[in-house]
Image (tube, grey):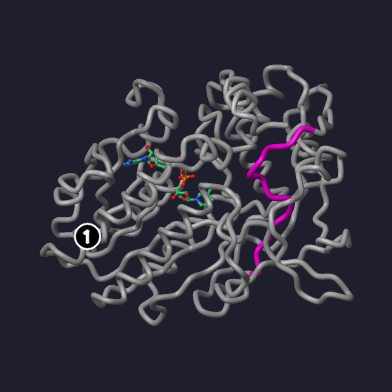
Amino acid sequence: MNILITGGAGFIGSNLSLRLLEKGYQVTVLDNLLPQVHGENPEEESPLFQNILGKVNFIKGDVTKKSDWLKAIKQQDSIIHLAALTGTGQSMYQIDKYTDVNVSGTAKMLDVLVNENHQIKKVILASSRAVYGEGKYFHKDLGIVYPKSRNLENMEKGEFEIKNESGKTLKPLPTDESSLLQPISVYGITKQIQEQLVMSVCSSVNIDAIALRFQNVYGAGQSLQNPYTGILSIFSSQILNDENLNIFEDGEESRDFIYIDDAVEAIILSLENTDVKNKVFNIGTGVSTTVLELAKTLKKYYNKDIEINISGQFRIGDIRHNFADISLAQEKLSFFPKVSFEEGIRKFTTWVLKQNMGKIKYNQSLHEMIEKGLLK
Ligand SMILES: NC(=O)c1ccc[n+]([C@@H]2O[C@H](COP(=O)([O-])OP(=O)(O)OC[C@H]3O[C@@H](n4cnc5c(N)ncnc54)[C@H](O)[C@@H]3O)[C@@H](O)[C@H]2O)c1
């Protein structure tokens, strides 16, 4: 089977490429080697790109260019569409860029699939939990609630938990696939549109489509230079450079962290399953971890005597909590994540310590957000 992976030089894509090669697939990667992810000289600076160089059929190209799609799509059986701009915060001030790459790039792919000759039978799209916005909540008097984005005034007073309009504090529940879609970041909006485009167009031309709504994927091999995404890389860079950590909000905001090997496995299960068609799945662990817990665990594994400060600052576009209900993926894809948070962090930190971890230009990303009024 010939598999085309867009964004195949990135974190998920490069790990997936290597795993598919191991399994005997022919892998073609279409990737523009974005400097924000790979540095200015990817051949020298990007371990992600170096890992796949010479192993996959690599096409340097852009998903927003139809001509690059036409080159890449020849003789392919399936497409795994991962190429995207991925920074939630950054998406709030680079709206045109994010919609161009994420939405128009996907539209270009679909245009080629509908109008050109090809043998593609399946498309797998990397979507995101960002499509849910704040996700699913519960209150004993109100039942299930899908809250809108948080009130700025409350957050400025340091009240970060999710409340309904009449001020009742709500309790987060695992978000299932039928939960309301109401993204609160431009990134989340682009992911929702990508998903809807893929699911609707592919089924109209009889191509099987699967969208995977990933939670926070982390692990060995993630970009250690992108200051716009990857909280683990940012914290690691600060800890290893003996800087204290400043945690947003009150540190109790939480995420569902899924190890890269489990995320790759979910894609392979989706690729190899011939019964599941035109479905959307949550891919996470179902376990919620606070950002404070993450910071403490990283500090423990790096064994560094730095301080963890709660800054009370917050970013517009960030959600409070989200963790996945993965029962559908368990039932239909037999997806059972294997790596626990503690084991994943141990693997990640062991890997980081062997890398040339420089200083991530994180302050630059914060200044950009402050300048745009998006970091309070
Ligand atoms: N990593 C996560 O936690 C996570 C969570 C939810 C969803 N996702 C989704 O998974 C996918 C992969 O994420 P990742 O973490 O590997 O990101 P990444 O930034 O490491 O990889 C993205 C790759 O896409 C390439 N790319 C960017 N713009 C492109 C363009 N115009 N044309 C061609 N290539 C382009 C980049 O060079 C990079 O190699 C994305 O669609 C992302 O939205 C990731």
Left or right of 205, for residue 87: right
The relative height of residue 104 versus residue 121 in the rendered view (above or below) is above
Q: Quadrant of the N terminus?
A: bottom left
Which amino acid, by three-letter code, is at mark 1? Asp
**Residue under label 1:** 111
Q: Where on the picture, by quarter, is residue 211?
A: bottom left
241 to the left or right of 187: right
**Which residue is rendered at x = 50% and y = 74% of the image?**
333
Q: Nearer the viewer, residue 1 or 79?
A: 79
Check mark 1 vs ligand 1: CB closer than 8 Å? yes or no: no
Q: Residues within 10 Å of mark 1 (few under 14, many from 20)?
A: some
Instruction: Please report the residue visible at 19 percent of the width from the left and 66 percent of the height from the top.
Output: 114
The rendered magenta stretch, by its main secondary structure, is classed as loop
Q: Quadrant of ligand 1?
A: top left
Question: Where residue 222 sits: x, y (%)?
Answer: 51, 38
Viewer-nearest residue: 11 or 126: 126
Quadrant position of residue 286 = bottom right
Task: Kindly indicate the quadrant of the structure image that contains residue 180.
Answer: bottom right
Query: Quick check: is 314 in the magenta stretch?
Result: yes
Determine whether, in the image, residue 20 is placed left or right of residue 89: left
For residue 68, above or below residue 201: above
Q: Is residue 224 magenta?
A: no
- Start and end of the magenta stretch? 313-325
Residue in view at x 80 percent, y 37 percent? 296
- Compared to residue 145, the image places residue 38 above or below, namely above
Give the residue at x 55% y 33%. Answer: 228
The total number of labels drawn is 1
Q: Position of residue 139 (x, y in %)?
A: 85, 70
Farthest residue in the left direction?
A: 117
**The C terminus, quarter of image:** top right
Callout 1 secondary element: helix
Residue 107: x and y in percent read 29, 56
